[in-house]
Amino acid sequence: MSLLAYSYRVPLCVPYWNGATYRNILYALASGGVVDGPDLGRLKSLLIDKLDLAEAVLCGSGSLAVEIALRSCGVREGDEVVIPTFCCTAVVAPILAAGAIPVLADAGEELNITAEAVDAVLTEKTRAIVVPHLFGNPANIDPVIEIARARNIRVIDDAAQAVGATIGGRPAGSFGDAGVLSFGSEKVCFGLGGGVVVSRQKEVLNGGSQTKLAPPRLSPAVRSFFSTTIWRRWRRWTLPVKAALSHVKGTGPDSPPVPYRQESMANLNATVALSLLETLDENIAARRARVGAYQDLLGTEEGLELIPHRGGSACLTQVVRVFPKTRVADPAARLIQVLGSAGYEVQGSYVPIHLLSRYRQWVREPLPYAERLWGDLIELPCEPEVSFDHMERIALIVKQVLNS
Ligand SMILES: Cc1ncc(COP(=O)(O)O)c(C=O)c1O
């Protein structure tokens, strides 16, 4: 492939950083505040205040936050934990790390897990249910909590993809027994990585005292700063360089998730997270405006469906379902390819976990909805830096491909 093919006008998931983010990073670097420093305490207090929490534990990643949440909820060896099959595979590793068994549930029409799908896979051994809000779009978590309460099962409100989203005015992440936030790659608050376990019930996280994490190390923290800045924030210019260096690895959905470190959060990561929380309202307002623009541009187009975002969504991306009965064979794949050639780095959505060979063993029930749907989905970018001109161009290409 020519190097020009890697030169995108709109690259995939560029973190939303501003001048203050860089200034704060430089200050933390210059003052020796990479590993430890005051921003850790500031971030914790801000989140406790913003989400009206009893406790928050800062850790190295959202994946580790899921593991801590599971352990805090009493999940032990041999317990079953329900997760949606239509989800990022990052949620599987923390379940296995806790010695538990992942049990896969089907997706609902809005692509999130539903109470009905959960109900179909519960057993005597179910100890917890993880409810992610995919694409920033709030799942209907209250009915899941109701089912869980009746059976003494714990619910983890996984807002890794939905920091800033609300459900009935209340922040995503603050529902259930424990919640999870992430400042990791390709999230609404895409920082230098880091996760937070939160709860409104003091006894669940026990004041954070049960969680003994190793301190963060200097070299991975500095490495993650350079790699996120160079390869993700400046992706538009550096992707061709990466391609030239042959570093563009095909990490397919079946690749094992990147192992996470059992460490607490580094101060530098908290510094960036704080700056992202400062601009969170404008970040989400811009994303919602982009979801609205796609609706105006493509909402009445035949042959596709824009998966609706509920009120309160953080609008991470706009998922589009392309109906296969259009004249183009495999229109979703064709769209990704044509948009890519025009400079728009878009991707398909998740391959259901139960269809991936390394995870197939955990499926019990047929999961027909996710199976039928996933190949027809693509995700359109909603980052604040994607201009309305670019969205018009994207919409035009979508229409041309569907009508070609
Ligand atoms: C729903 C969900 N939960 C948890 C995680 C893990 O977060 P992190 O990337 O910070 O480890 C992810 C990662 O993509 C996710 O999508």
Image (cartoon, helix red, strand yellow):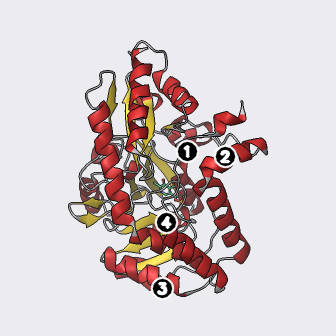
Query: Would you name the residue on which mark 4 appears?
Result: 18
Task: Give the position of the C terminus as an image quadrant.
Answer: top left
Cα distance in 3D space between marks 4 and 2 = 21 Å
Q: Which numbered disc flags the more N-terminal residue, 1 or 4?
A: 1
**Which mark is drawn over residue 239?**
2
> What is the crowding at mark 4: few (fewer than 14 residues within 10 Å), some, or many (at least 20)?
few
Name the spot of residue 165 as percent of width and height, x first.
Answer: 32, 60
Name the spot of residue 220 as percent of width and height, x first.
Answer: 70, 69
**Residue farthest to the left, as pictured:** 168
Cα distance in 3D space between marks 1 and 3 = 34 Å
Nearer the observer, disc 4 or disc 2? 4
Of the residues shown, which amino acid type is indicated by label 2? Leu
* Residue contact between numbered discs 1 and 3, judged by CB atoms under 8 Å: no
Of the residues shown, which amino acid type is indicated by label 3? Gly
Nearer the observer, disc 1 or disc 4? 4
Query: Would you name the residue on which mark 3 appears?
Result: 41
> What is the crowding at mark 1: few (fewer than 14 residues within 10 Å), some, or many (at least 20)?
many
Of the residues shown, which amino acid type is indicated by label 4? Asn
Name the spot of residue 48 as percent of width and height, x first.
Answer: 36, 79
Q: Which numbered disc flags the more N-terminal residue, 4 or 2?
A: 4
* Residue contact between numbered discs 1 and 2, judged by CB atoms under 8 Å: yes
